[in-house]
Amino acid sequence: MPSDLSDAFRAHPVYLHHQHTDFNSLQELPESYTWKQQDHEQYPSSKDSFSLQETVPVIDLMDPNAPKLVGHACKTWGVFQVINHGIPTSLLHEIEWAGKTLFSLPPQQKHRAARSPDGVSGYGVARISSFFPKLMWSEGFTVVGSPLDHFRKLWPQDYSEYCDIVVEYEKEMKMLAGRLLWLMLDALGISKDDIKWAGPKGDFKGATAPLQMNSYPICPDPDRAMGLAAHTDSTLLTILYQNSISGLQVHREGKGWLTVPPVQGGFVINVGDLLHILSNGLYPTVLHRVITNRTKPRFSVAYLYGPPSNVTISPLSKLEYMDQ
Ligand SMILES: O=C(O)CCC(=O)C(=O)O
Ligand SMILES: [Fe+2]
């Protein structure tokens, strides 16, 4: 059995099928990117008025009620958006600028920093690609720890400016992730004593947290393409920054796919599979996907927050007999 993420990736290599796909040069959707209608309808969207009224909760973290609202959103949705989170807007603009600059490099240049088939970091297709018969209309870049080695290959002269932005973003995300995780755990009555791997100060020091940048170029045939196929994140929680272009959808039991409208300066917070397990199923993990559009490129950054790699996650004993 794989013992950590790298072992798991070695066991499921992902090859860059489309060695030098230049999305922007394609006028028609190639067959390899054409998904069947039933792939889109695998979890059908209902056409009733419920789905129009329902929307993912937006929580103001400065609101004194925020802890209660976070707990409620985790239990009933497994996803919510946060505003007033304390991350400077300028940093969001900078990470977006760095990411967009990266993805707009010529294909050959991006491939200098290609992720190896069994690797974790670098440029490549979505890691979940190997589970699907068709390709997704997106490209990704994963950073684990320092981006230095990869960024040197992309920008031999001026890598340091890009590195500084990513390192600063990771630092801010780490603090926000710890704060959010405690809000989520507090709402279940879980304290620092219950989670040994949180460390004596509860600062989750050894947490693993790859940063996943995603680019969804404009698409000639969005109805038949898939930006990112339906999946749940194998994290404790994910902090997602999406630019102003919508495309992210979450699946709501009995209601179908709901778009998560971009909120200026906000983050989308997902409950991941590991928090679902840790909470003994009290918090559902959220199924989500990304659809493409014909006119505006979309960009997102996911901070995939998980426990230290040597920790085994199982339901917290305090929650074992909780009535669900
Ligand atoms: O681009 C998005 O909005 C979602 C990205 C995502 O789900 C992921 O990177 O796991
Ligand atoms: Fe995801």
Image (tube, helix red, strand yellow):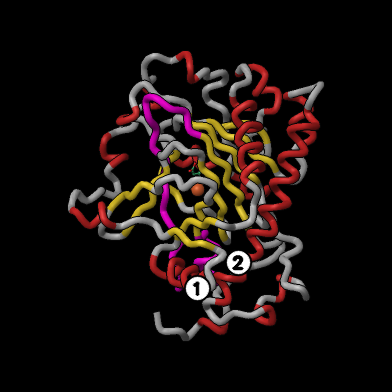
User: What residue appears at the point 30 percent right and 31 percent down from the top-left corner?
Assistant: 223
Residue 116 within the magenta-colored segment of the rendering? no
User: What residue appears at the point 57 percent right and 77 percent down from the top-left corner?
Assistant: 186
Q: Are marks 2 and 1 in contact (CB under 8 Å)?
A: no
Location of mark 1 (residue): 65
Q: Which of 266 and 111 is in front in this view?
A: 266
Would residue 152 be seen by someone viewing this image from the given angle?
yes
Give how far across and how far down residue 39 sits, in percent: 31, 40
Of marks 2 and 1, which one's residue comes earlier in the chain? 1
The stretch of residues the image draws in magenta is 271-298
Amino acid type at circle 2 is Leu
Give how far across and how far down residue 71 sits, in percent: 48, 72
Q: Distance between the residues labelled 2 and 1?
A: 16 Å
Q: Which part of the image, by quadrant, shows the N terminus?
A: bottom right
User: What residue appears at the point 60 percent right and 52 percent down from the top-left corner?
Assistant: 304
Location of mark 2 (residue): 181
Per the image, label 1 sits on a secondary structure element best described as loop
Give how far across and how far down residue 79 sits, in percent: 45, 59
